[in-house]
Image (cartoon, rainbow, N blue to C red):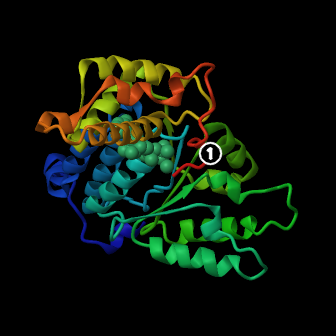
Amino acid sequence: MNSVLKDPVGDDARFNLDAAFRDSHVADVIEKLEAELVGLAPVKTRIRDICSLLLVDTLRRQAGLSTEAPSLHMSFTGNPGTGKTTVALRMAEILHHLGYVRKGHMVAVTRDDLVGQYIGHTAPKTREVLKRAMGGVLFIDEAYYLYRPENERDYGQEAIEILLQEMENHRDDLVVILAGYEDRMDRFFRSNPGMSSRIAHHIAFPDYSSEELMAIAQLMLEQMQYMLSPDARSTLREYIERRQKQPHFANARSVRNALDRARLRQASRLFAKRTASLAKRDLMTIEAEDIRASRVFAEPAPVETQREGELQT
Ligand SMILES: Nc1ncnc2c1ncn2[C@@H]1O[C@H](COP(=O)(O)OP(=O)(O)O)[C@@H](O)[C@H]1O
Ligand SMILES: [Mg+2]
């Protein structure tokens, strides 16, 4: 028991969880998370639970109670565009506010950033990434690509071993978040029990419903100071419902991409009639035709050439 080394705290000492909460300013980050992310109720609940755990842990430390540094490594599973990267960024801020990492930045990597092509290249690459991530969050996207059992001498294994070691040795100053598709991540954990046992929090990101995707579009448009005409709104809904059924659908990312393309078409439409004077409202409004021109409306339903779902960034 290390508590004997500290000043003993009496059994009648009082602790103020609410004051600790307010001092941490973590509420600001949670508010931001609520405001910028539509839906994701189960994810938001898990994050609040983790905050509670860490705040209680802080008070326990003040009370001289046993406080082994809590394991905070996490896995975020879900399809592309479900908000994993965005939530990981907020998580880094939360951990920083609560004093669990020094800096609160996030370093996002994939296999290629960690694993070298030749013998002797992997360890320095992995260590360099770990050095950059220290004091913050290391986000490893599509983490299962680190493990390639079909290649007998795959250097990914070397990266995994270094990661495991550092996740243990620096658990008080580095949080690793492994992200990717749920089924592949499950398989990865089954084959890598060492990694599995170091992950304390598994958070699943569900696909969005079409209503949620509409709300996400609305939020994105507001942030960009654009708006939909009433016709454009119903066209976007139809677009989303069609797009959801097509290959490589990437949830909120597909919505963002669709809006980017609609903005391009709006600009071309305005430019084509550039001699006419424009109201501020014209510069802001996406019309139905700006969405309707998408090949998502072409029959038969084609495959988008852009493979949004392939790489999770
Ligand atoms: N619930 C949500 N509400 C609003 N925007 C979202 C939501 N989820 C994702 N986004 C947006 O969609 C895009 C893709 O999200 P991202 O976090 O990169 O997903 P993932 O990492 O799971 O692929 C980002 O622009 C993000 O801001
Ligand atoms: Mg991502």
Among the 4 quarters of the image, the one containing residue 307 = top right
Residue 284 is situated, as x and y percent measured from the top left of the image, at 20, 37
User: Label 1 sits on what residue type?
Assistant: Glu
Visible in this render: residue 209? no
Q: Position of residue 162 (x, y in %)?
A: 64, 71
Q: Residue 226: image x %, image y %?
A: 23, 37
**Which class describes the residues within 10 Å of circle 1: few (<14), some (14-19), or many (20+)?**
few
The residue positioned 33% from the left and 70% from the top of the image is 103
Ligand 1 location (quadrant): top left
Looking at the image, which is closer to me, 152 or 52?
152
Residue drawn at (49%, 71%), measured in percent from left and top?
A: 170
Q: Is 241 placed left or right of 247 in the picture?
A: left
Q: Nearer the viewer, residue 84 or 8?
A: 84
Residue 99 x %, y %? 29, 64
- Image vertical order of residue 243 relative to residue 23, above or below: above
Secondary structure state at the residue bearing disc 1 = loop
Residue occupied by mark 1: 310
